[in-house]
Structure formats: structure tokens, C-alpha cells
Image (cartoon, grey):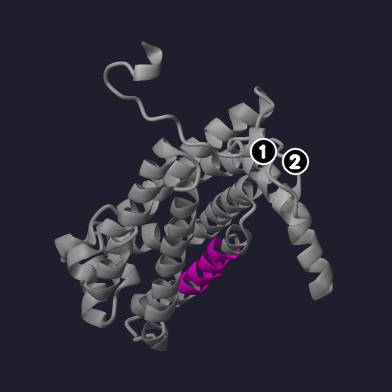
Amino acid sequence: MPIGGLQIWFDAQRMRDPAPTRWWALTALFGVAATAFGITLTQVFPPSGPAIADGYGSPVIAFEFARSQADLLGIFGADSDPLQVSRLAAMRTGNEQDYLYMLLYAGFLASGCIALWRELRSRHLLAAAALPVLAALSDAWENWLLLDIQAAFTIGEYSPAMASLPWPVAAKFLLLALTNVAIGHAMTQMGRWWQLAGTLVIVASLPVVMALVAPADFGWTLIASIGGGWIVLLGMAAIGSWRALIGKRPLVDFERRANVRRTADRGEAEPPETVFRAAPRRRFGRRKSDR
């Protein structure tokens, strides 16, 4: 589509009448699937390692931030460790199944961004839908490196893939954090209670930077920081789906703002019914005119 045609399409979307969107139902469907599969996936990965720093929280997070053979020994154990084989098998199975999880969370977050764009008509939300897709691609690259590293460790060798591992890991978590920030910012434009939820989502994304800088101390915050925003989005998708499918209404009442924009674009005076007037200030006592 030519640039001019794309601009016309964006303008048409911005000026259209408010209407419920089925993207909330798709978001809720992906969200429930991602949540259920994510809970199942946590039971697949090894629950512990022989020498993992407490700050990582789980062996899979420690594996993502492994930088040396010593780190791998702390995650899987030495050859004399009777649990090494079971840990290696569990980690490999979990990383293989993780590819399905990438598709689910990318669909969940991308659908949520598109649903918010349909409600708020902001272009940056449509662009933000690409962030979780890029995060899933980074996650896939990360998984490919982890499988290579684990295969080399199993036969007692060092994998050069370990030198490249920090890049997709940092890209994945930063892109997911940026997605949460975009979603949280959209919530702050939807009303008082949504403003509170959106602010919490944005603030909760900040520890991601700390975890990337000092993973051995703050790695455990990654799941909570990213997952908190997902829980809020899932709740919003449930409400949006109910209003769209049952109430036949959009989640955001955009009609009055749309009327004001249409009037302004035509160069006409704003009709009284679309002007936002502040509520009259209440005073104690009676005015003289009331006596």
C-alpha cells in the first residue's frame, strides 16, 4: 500500500464510529492458552540445581544467563551427580516445548495490542504489536543456542554458542518489557481505574533492567515483572470480550472524542453536546441568588 494510501487508512480508522472488537476474544483465548501451557511448562523444567545462586530463582533462568562451564556444572551437576541425567533431560524437553509457548504468548500480546489499537486508535499500539513477535523470534534464537550448549555439555565439550547467548536473552526480555510498557501506557488513557492498573504495569517492568545487569541477584524478578502485565492484560481481555460479545459495546467510550475530532477537522464549531464541560464547583451554603 502506498504511503499516501496508508495515511488515508489510518485517518479512516481514527475517525470511524466506535464499535466493539472481537480482538478481545482472541486475546482472551490466547491468554488462557498461554497461561495454562505456561503453568504446565514450569513443571517440565528441572526444579533445582546443585549450585545455583538464589537470585536466579529457577534453573531455567540460570541456564539463560550461563556464561561458562562452571555455570553449567552449577545447573546440571558434575558427571558423578546421579541427578545430572534427569536434569539434562528435563531441560531439553522444556526448551523443546517452549517453542509452542512462544507462539502462544506472542499471539496473546500481539492480539492485545491490536485490540487496544481498535479501541484507542493510536498508531503506536499497532506498531507495538510487532514487539512480542520480535521477542518470540529472539526467544527461538535463544532456545536454539541453549540446545546447542546443552548438547556440547553432555559430551564434555564447550559450545561457542555460549558467547552469543546474551544477545537474544537481553533482546527477548527488553522487548517483552517494552510491550508491557506500551500496554500500560494505553491503559492510562482509558479511565481512572485503568490508569492505576496501567501505572502498575509500567512500574513493574522496571526491574527487568536490574535483572539483566545483575541476573544472579535479580533474575527471579523477570517472571514477576513480565507476568504481572500479562495478568492485567488477560483481565482486560476478559472484560473487553464480555462487553463486545454480550453487551455489544466497546471497552472504551470513544464516541464523544471522535465527534470533537470530526468537528475540528471540518473547521466547524463544536456542538454543545460534544464539548467537555467541567462539572460546576460545589460550594457550602447558598448563593445570594438562591435566597
Q: Residues within 10 Å of mark 1 (few under 14, many from 20)?
A: some
Is 274 on the left-hand or right-hand side of 190? right
In the foreground, 107 or 285: 285
Q: Picture quarter containing residue 168? A: bottom left
Compared to 63, does 118 lie above or below?
above
Identified at 25% across, 75% down, the residue is 213
Residue stretch rendered in magenta on the structure: 130-143
Residue 181 x, y percent position in the rendering: 43, 58
Compared to 225, does 156 lie above or below?
below
Residue 9 x, y percent position in the rendering: 79, 60
Identified at 58% across, 53% down, the residue is 113
Q: What secondary structure characterizes most of the magenta part?
A: helix
Identified at 75% across, 58% down, the residue is 11
Q: Please, what is the three-letter code of the amino acid marked with disc 1?
A: Glu
Look at mark 1 in the image and give the residue it sits on: 255
Residue 57 x, y percent position in the rendering: 23, 57
In the foreground, 167 or 74: 167
Identified at 31% across, 54% down, the residue is 204
Q: Picture quarter containing residue 26? A: top right
Image label count: 2
Residue 58 x, y percent position in the rendering: 26, 57
> Of helix, strand and loop, which one carries label 1?
helix
Q: Quadrant of the C terminus?
A: top left
Q: Quadrant of the N terminus?
A: bottom right
> Of helix, strand and loop, which one carries label 2?
loop
Q: Please, what is the three-letter code of the amino acid marked with disc 2?
A: Asp
Assess whether mark 1 and mark 2 are in contact (beta carbons under 8 angstroms).
yes
Residue 17: give its label.
2
**159 inside magenta stretch:** no
Q: Is residue 77 visible?
A: no
**133 inside magenta stretch:** yes
Of mark 2 and mark 1, the one earlier in the sequence is 2
